[in-house]
């Protein structure tokens, strides 16, 4: 029986530039000129998002977090929960986020669920490339605060 792993003896032809897939990679640091505060505004993240709703009855936020170490295939994503976790069951909301089978790659997917009283906001982020897990976690943490 043959296997699909390992390098083959023959060299593969290079991929044409217009057929390459986009993927996230490391980029040079962006340098700004002049006043660094121009055009910037405060962003609510983590507990700060929950603090935007001080006079509400029930609120809950759940989202992905970095795993402490390597994960096995199909292992559940580590999550951070803030607020009333019973809201998920009351509103019939469920979630699942599992690591794939690539042993060298962390779980690059991420998500968030934010529910406050009678409304909710949901996000799903699919990371790709060598830093895909960092990008999806960054968007997970930053996007809700940008929208709210």
Image (spheres, grey):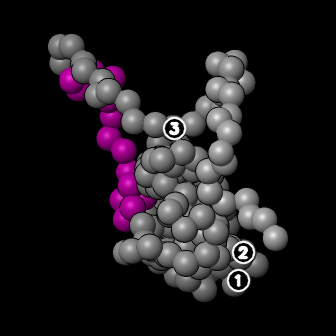
Q: Which residue is mark 1?
A: 90
Distance of mark 3 from mark 1, alpha carbons? 38 Å
- On the image, the x and y values in percent for residue 117 come to 61, 69
In the rendered structure, are the residues bearing label 1 and label 2 in contact, judged by CB atoms less than 8 Å apart?
A: no
Instruction: Find residue 38 and name its label.
Output: none
Distance of mark 1 from mark 2, alpha carbons? 8 Å
Q: In this view of the protein, which residue sits in the foreground, 27 or 105?
A: 105
Seen in the image, is 80 located left or right of residue 34? right
Q: Which segment is the magenta one?
A: 36-49
Decide whether the magenta segment is chiefly helix, strand or loop: loop
Location of residue 89 (image quadrant): bottom right
Name the residue furthest top.
Answer: 33
- On the image, the x and y values in percent for residue 61 come to 51, 69
Q: Residue at coordinates 18% horizontally, 18% vertically from top-left?
A: 35
Q: Which residue is mark 3?
A: 24
Q: Is residue 68 visible?
A: yes
Asked whether residue 44 is drawn in magenta, I would say yes
Label 1 packing within 10 angstroms: few (<14), some (14-19), many (20+): few
Q: Residue at coordinates 39% horizontally, 36% vertically from top-left?
A: 26
- On the image, the x and y values in percent for residue 132 come to 51, 49
Mark 3 vs mark 1: give the one in front: 3
Question: Dot 1 lies on which element?
Answer: helix
Q: Which residue is mark 2?
A: 93
Q: Does 36 appear above or below 94?
A: above
Label 3 packing within 10 angstroms: few (<14), some (14-19), many (20+): few
Question: Dot 3 lies on which element?
Answer: loop
In the rendered structure, are the residues bearing label 3 and label 2 in contact, judged by CB atoms less than 8 Å apart?
A: no
Seen in the image, is 139 located left or right of residue 128? left
Name the residue furthest left.
Answer: 34
């Amino acid at each position: 029986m043959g296997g699909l792993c390992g390098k083959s003896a023959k060299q593969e032809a290079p991929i044409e530039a217009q057929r390459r897939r986009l993927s996230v990679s490391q980029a040079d640091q962006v340098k700004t000129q002049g006043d660094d505060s121009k055009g910037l505004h405060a962003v609510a993240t983590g507990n700060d998002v929950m603090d935007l709703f001080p006079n509400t009855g029930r609120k809950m936020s759940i989202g992905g977090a970095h795993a402490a170490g390597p994960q096995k295939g199909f292992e559940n994503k580590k999550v951070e929960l803030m607020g009333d976790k019973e809201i998920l069951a009351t509103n019939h909301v469920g979630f699942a986020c599992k690591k794939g089978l690539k042993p060298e790659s962390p779980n690059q997917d991420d998500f968030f669920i934010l529910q406050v009283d009678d409304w909710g906001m949901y996000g799903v982020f699919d990371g790709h490339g060598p830093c895909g897990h960092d990008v999806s976690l960054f968007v997970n943490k930053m996007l809700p605060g940008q929208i709210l």
